[in-house]
Amino acid sequence: MIQVGLEHFLVVGTLLFALGVVCVIIRRNAVAILIGIELMLNASGLNLIAFSHYNDRAVEGSIFVLFIIVLAAAEAAVALALILAIKRRMKTIDLDRTNSLRG
Amino acid sequence: MSFSLLDLVFYAAALVTLATAVYAVGSRNIVRAVFALLGTFFGMAVLYGMLAADFVAVIQVLVYVGGILVLLLFAVMLTGNIETAPRSNRSAGLWLGALTGLALLALLVPLAIQAPWQKSGVGEFTQTTASIGSALLSNALLPFEVISIVLLGIVIGAVVIARHRQAEDTEAGK
């Protein structure tokens, strides 16, 4: 076990990102897929903060992550609205059955 | 081989973050998955704090735990049949997911460990709030203004999409 450094944080971020991708692929519930997307956004934020911390504590990493957090919140709000609309129209949020656009 | 307190905090926070994330991905019950995400977001806040990003850590707790998590819970509660939504796709979804995840890890973890990342030292700790504030009003002013317009559009758009339309409903109910 070596002292905790940049690589440790990058590995945690990678694991979190892979979990998010797996979540988006294997889940059918629209809310669960939204959870996967949030995991991926968090992983990218961790990487940005780690890089900026190990480069003279640059403040740009924090600013990037703040914008990511704002966009994640906005995305969650729109996704909630879309999920409610889909639920009203199709009576399900199982994304394998919301395929009425398929020819 | 010696553990400092900081290392212990890191491993504990990383363990909590990843374990709850695994539970959120794997749980069949979507309500439990959302509550497991609470641990993930708090663990991320601890990791941000360890990286001396104090302002981002606080914002992480405020926005993710106080906002996004509640929004996800609303989505779960409003869409009903919580228990029944199955985890996997009909055909090979689980295998495809596991394969993609393992391929990603095999590609990215060696890269993260071995690549010669640029590191120019850590420097003295200073609180970041003041420097973030002045950067948002100088260098990052344009994205700051753009994102406020984006937020306005999001608010209007979400209301328009989610609004209950009477005509549409009676048409769908026929």
Image (cartoon, rainbow, N blue to C red):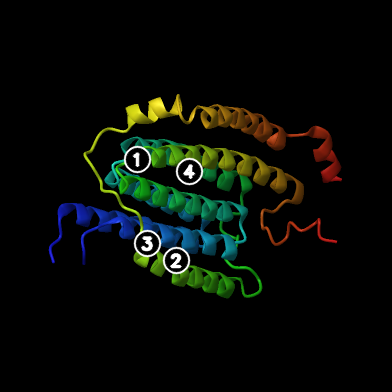
Residue located at (80% from left, 39% from top) = B169
For the C terminus of chain B, the image quarter is top right
Residue located at (65% from left, 46% from top) = A83
Report whether mark 3 lies on the same chain as mark 1: yes
Dot 2 falls on a residue whose secondary structure is helix
Q: Chain of mark 3?
A: A
> Can you identify the residue that label 3 sits on?
A11
Residue A18 vs residue B36, the one in the foreground: A18
Label 1 – label 2 distance at C-alpha? 24 Å
- The reply to whether discs 1 and 4 touch (Cβ–Cβ < 8 Å) is no
- The reply to whether discs 3 and 4 touch (Cβ–Cβ < 8 Å) is no
> Can you identify the residue that label 4 sits on?
B69
> Can you identify the residue that label 2 sits on?
B108
Q: Residues within 10 Å of mark 2 (few under 14, many from 20)?
A: some
Whether residue A21 appears in this view of the structure is: yes
Q: Chain of mark 1?
A: A
**The residue under label 2 is which amino acid type?**
Leu
Q: Chain of mark 4?
A: B
Dot 1 falls on a residue whose secondary structure is loop
Dot 4 falls on a residue whose secondary structure is helix
Q: Closer to us: mark 1 or mark 2?
A: 1
Residue located at (76% from left, 47% from top) = A89
**Which tag, 3 or 1, sits closer to the chain's start?**
3
Q: Is residue B131 left or right of residue B99?
A: left
